Image (cartoon, coloured by chain):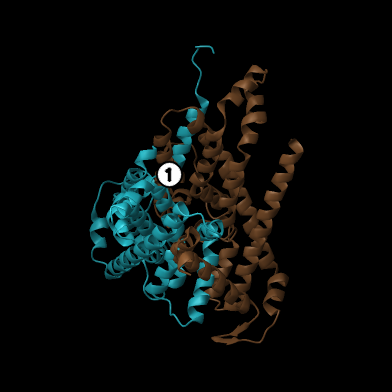
């Protein structure tokens, strides 16, 4: 190896790639503070008025409430299903385990439009009108793989002898689960709740097909994108959404690491 | 019976049953209904349940449908190729050239923890005629007139999707690079391989499983992507998902929409299987 200075091309490339990755994510917040109605350089000056106007829009607030409801119920349902399934996959060797694991991961790779159209057809066939309920049923489906994989890594690092000890000391099955297992995997549960909430909160295509007359936030944003006059408000709303997603998932990441700390 | 329930098989099956049934039912039942719909016809709001091949005939004879399916597969292929090629050096850098792997992996995934819809929307603003890119280049004096080839075409779709799928390429390739036994690389060098030869003959072949995983996980959902072609594709960049949405929405022809969904799914499956078979065969020939 010569010690002469060489341009570290790979590092230059990686940094350029990072700029490419962050460009669209940083751009929305940047222009949401811009005192102008078109998104172009040069910037016109700093303003908070686009954010202030958001509070006065009733349809927006209703969409926000819808999204919060859908996200919370989805998170609870997906995490409960994922918790038990992950426990089974990690703890027990049983016939059909691989089949079941593969099936549960399937929603990750089916194109969104196919999930959305087939669920719409299903729900209409059984007499369920598009509503927040149908959106929740769809979101649980797409959020489940995330919950299962997070809970699996939480159970992976779980020391079984702790459960056996609780058993030997006279705890019942339910008691052991509640007083030993749950507290230990709690960080994993929190991580799963946050991630599945965010998956639902950001999901668009399914909600677009299944929400009927009660739009979630992404569906509301979609309806606003068409109006150039609304652009600055859409930017402000989008920036808020971007930041809350990133924040939620950073917190989730913190809990996920705590749940798998022993292995790191 | 009680014995079965106490066994590992019993406990495992019971615990995993709710999730398995939920996903299984929501995959199988809608699929069956979709198949049924594809043989029905619709006039306004009435569904005619007489079985007919009419939808398939229409789908196969309409040049627009064939064109959109071929274009969707072609765009998804281009996106897969672009994403994997752009991502490979980054995965390589994280696996071999840095100690702070966790930090880099986190840095790369953070942008993707935000709404997909908003990221695509942001690309639309960047690439537009009076958009960020053009206005920045003009104020820097690099161009006089706005560039028109940026938005509303296949290029915009491929660029946006190559951005959207970046971590799904970087992570599997990184994992397979990380698994490589470093002594193999030393052996190659000791036996006289140049750096390039060592990469082509040792490193690259060992990461093929990661590359295949990345290709499938990007290609399959991309064929059915709706948001990106709708926002940045213009009329040149429309894909099959947009046509499916129209059938379920404005055109109100659910049977045709169901047929198109099934055909899209079949084409994805065919291309994915062909790809895996081809790569595996190629791998055997090299050995």
The image position of residue B285, as x and y in percent, is 76, 39
Is the C terminus of chain A in the top left, top right, bottom left or bottom right quadrant?
top left
Identify the chain of the residue marked 1, using the numbered disc in the image: B
Identified at 32% across, 47% down, the residue is A255
The image position of residue A181, as x and y in percent, is 32, 53
Res B234 seen here = no
Is the N terminus of chain A in the top left, top right, bottom left or bottom right quadrant?
top right
Which residue in the protein does label 1 denote?
B109
Identified at 59% across, 21% down, the residue is B186
B286 to B271, vertically: above or below? above
Q: Is residue A44 left or right of residue B130?
A: left
A75 to B149, vertically: above or below? below
Identified at 67% across, 49% down, the residue is B276
A126 to B127, vertically: above or below? below
What is the display colour for chain B? brown
Identified at 47% across, 65% down, the residue is B3
The image position of residue B184, as x and y in percent, is 61, 26
Residue placed most toward the observer, B157 or A14:
A14
Q: Residues within 10 Å of mark 1 (few under 14, many from 20)?
A: some
Residue placed most toward the observer, B34 or A153:
A153
Residue B46 falls in image quadrant? bottom right
- Output the letter for the chain in cyan: A
Residue B85 falls in image quadrant? top right
User: Callout 1: helix, strand or loop?
Assistant: helix
Residue B52 falls in image quadrant? bottom right
């Amino acid at each position: 190896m010569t010690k002469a200075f060489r341009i570290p091309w790979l590092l230059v490339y990686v940094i350029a790639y990072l700029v490419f990755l962050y460009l669209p994510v940083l751009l929305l917040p940047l222009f949401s503070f811009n005192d102008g109605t078109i998104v172009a350089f040069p910037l016109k000056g700093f303003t908070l008025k686009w954010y202030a106007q958001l509070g006065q829009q009733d349809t927006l607030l209703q969409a926000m409430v819808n999204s919060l409801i859908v996200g919370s119920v989805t998170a609870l349902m997906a995490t409960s299903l994922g918790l038990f399934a992950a426990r089974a996959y990690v703890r027990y060797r049983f016939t059909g385990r691989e089949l079941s694991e593969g099936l549960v991961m399937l929603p990750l790779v089916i194109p969104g439009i196919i999930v959305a159209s087939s669920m719409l057809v299903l729900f209409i066939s059984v007499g369920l009108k598009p509503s927040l309920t149908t959106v929740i049923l769809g979101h649980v489906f797409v959020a489940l793989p995330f919950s299962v994989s997070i809970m699996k890594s939480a159970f992976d690092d779980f020391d079984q002898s702790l459960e056996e000890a609780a058993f030997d000391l006279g705890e019942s099955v339910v008691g052991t689960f509640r007083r030993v297992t749950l507290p230990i995997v709690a960080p994993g549960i929190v991580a799963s709740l946050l991630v599945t909430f965010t998956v639902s909160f950001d999901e668009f295509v399914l909600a677009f097909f299944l929400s009927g007359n009660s739009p979630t936030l992404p569906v509301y944003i979609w309806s606003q994108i068409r109006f150039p006059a609304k652009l600055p408000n859409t930017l402000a709303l989008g920036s808020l959404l971007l930041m809350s997603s990133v924040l939620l998932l950073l917190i989730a990441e913190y809990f996920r690491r705590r749940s798998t700390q022993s292995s790191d | 019976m009680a014995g079965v329930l106490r066994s590992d098989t019993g406990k495992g099956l019971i615990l995993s049953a709710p999730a398995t049934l939920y996903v299984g039912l929501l995959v199988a039942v809608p699929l069956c209904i979709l198949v049924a719909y594809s043989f029905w016809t619709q006039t306004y709001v009435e569904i005619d349940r007489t079985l007919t091949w009419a939808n398939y005939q229409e789908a196969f004879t309409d040049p627009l449908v064939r064109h959109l399916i071929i274009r969707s597969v072609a765009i998804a292929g281009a996106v897969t190729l672009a994403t994997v090629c752009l991502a490979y050096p980054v995965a390589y850098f994280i696996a071999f050239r840095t100690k702070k792997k966790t930090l880099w992996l986190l840095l790369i995934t953070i942008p993707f923890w935000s709404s997909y819809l908003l990221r695509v929307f942001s690309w639309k603003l960047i690439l537009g005629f009076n958009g960020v890119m053009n206005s920045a280049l003009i104020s820097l004096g690099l161009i006089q007139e706005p560039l028109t080839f940026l938005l509303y075409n296949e290029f915009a779709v491929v660029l946006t999707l190559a951005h959207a799928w970046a971590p799904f390429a970087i992570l599997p390739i990184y994992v397979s690079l990380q698994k490589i036994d470093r002594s193999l690389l030393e052996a190659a060098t000791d036996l006289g391989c140049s750096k390039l030869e060592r990469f082509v003959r040792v490193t690259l072949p060992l990461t093929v499983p990661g590359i295949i995983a990345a290709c499938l996980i990007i290609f399959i959902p991309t064929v059915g992507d709706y948001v990106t072609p709708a926002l940045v594709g213009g009329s040149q960049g429309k894909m099959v998902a947009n046509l499916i949405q129209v059938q379920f929405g404005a055109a109100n022809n659910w049977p045709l929409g169901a047929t198109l969904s099934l055909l899209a799914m079949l084409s994805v499956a065919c291309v994915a299987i062909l790809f895996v078979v081809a790569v595996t065969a190629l791998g055997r020939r090299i050995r």
